[in-house]
Image (cartoon, rainbow, N blue to C red):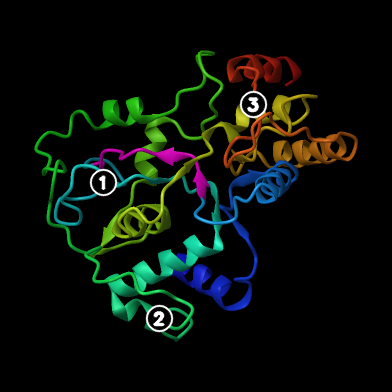
Amino acid sequence: MKALAALDWIRRYCINVTYFLKADDDAFVNVFAAIKHLRDIELVGYRRHLLMCLVWHRPVVARRGKWAVSRTEFARRRYPTYCCGLGYVITADVLLLLLSAAAAACPDVGQHVCGNSLSGDDVTAAGNLSIYNDVTIGDDVPDTDVTDSVDDITRNLLLNDTGNTDKGHVLSADNVTTKAAVAVGRRFWIDDVYVTGLLVEELGGRVKHTDMSAAYCKSDKMASIYRHLTEWYKYVFTQVADDEARLYRDTWNALRQRAANTTIPSPSVTRPGHLADHYIPLSTMLQMAKRTA
């Protein structure tokens, strides 16, 4: 309900804005890189149909542990594809579609958001949706063996610490299960799966996830990344732990100085989610961070 209320507040008071950035409270956001990228894609016409994020590709539902989801709560073996909730960028038209999906799937939802219905002239009806129907369909057969959950989740990650890829990533395999939604009745309390997964799925292809995975990194590399002459403008989102307040503050101060004295170059091809042509491998950046620690 908090997530829907936030979307509805935007609809009411600032829907004329083109892009919206959502970030968790433990996210370090490189606003300089984010604004530069959004200005670039806006100039070439990418103003609609965008949900840019680090995409979780149909991760397996965890059945064990603190954040387990029972088959009664969610019968399907995998969640729909959804966005890592650390941070993502969404355009206004997509925001309205998500609200319409929520209102159509559960008409009473609107009565709980700002005390008013989500439906109206500025919210297009999405049709008769089945978002709260946990009946298993297609290849999402009920799982009888949960032993492959961690392996499947690990394979789903964009592993970046081997030096074989320049794709950034935020969460480890162990942490993915903490981001999987726990259903309360038939409504998820984790907004990431609900808003960017189930609602997107129920829109039937009208919204697609745009890969922005290279713009994410872990906090163990942020000290070197955001101080680096050529890498600081290539990343937007970093997850920072509660005990890393000093790292957050020092990195932010260094990033401000770097941004004040450097012009961010545009990549050779301008497209959503593509901030740069080349990256120094994150394994190299980690070694640099260790040497400066």
Q: Position of residue 236 (x, y in %)?
A: 64, 40
Q: Amino acid at mark 3?
A: Lys
User: Badge 2: few (under 14), some or many (20 or more) residues near its Cα, within 10 Å?
Assistant: some
**Residue range of the region highlighted in magenta in the rendering:** 51-62
Residue at screen point 41% across, 49% down: 208
Numbered disc 1: secondary structure: loop
Give the vertical position of 46 relative to 291 (above or below).
Answer: below
Q: CA distance from mark 1 to mark 3?
A: 30 Å
Q: Mark 2 or mark 1, which has the lower sequence index?
A: 1
User: Badge 1: few (under 14), some or many (20 or more) residues near its Cα, within 10 Å?
Assistant: some
Front position in the image: 183 or 272: 272
Occupied quadrant, residue 246: top right
The residue where tag 2 is placed is 119
Quadrant of the rendering where the C terminus is positioned: top right
Q: Is residue 43 left or right of residue 145?
A: right
Q: Is residue 94 left or right of residue 282?
A: left
Numbered disc 3: secondary structure: helix
Q: Position of residue 144 (x, y in %)?
A: 9, 38
Q: Mark 3 or mark 2, which has the lower sequence index?
A: 2
Q: Position of residue 17 (x, y in %)?
A: 65, 65
Labelled disc at residue 68: 1
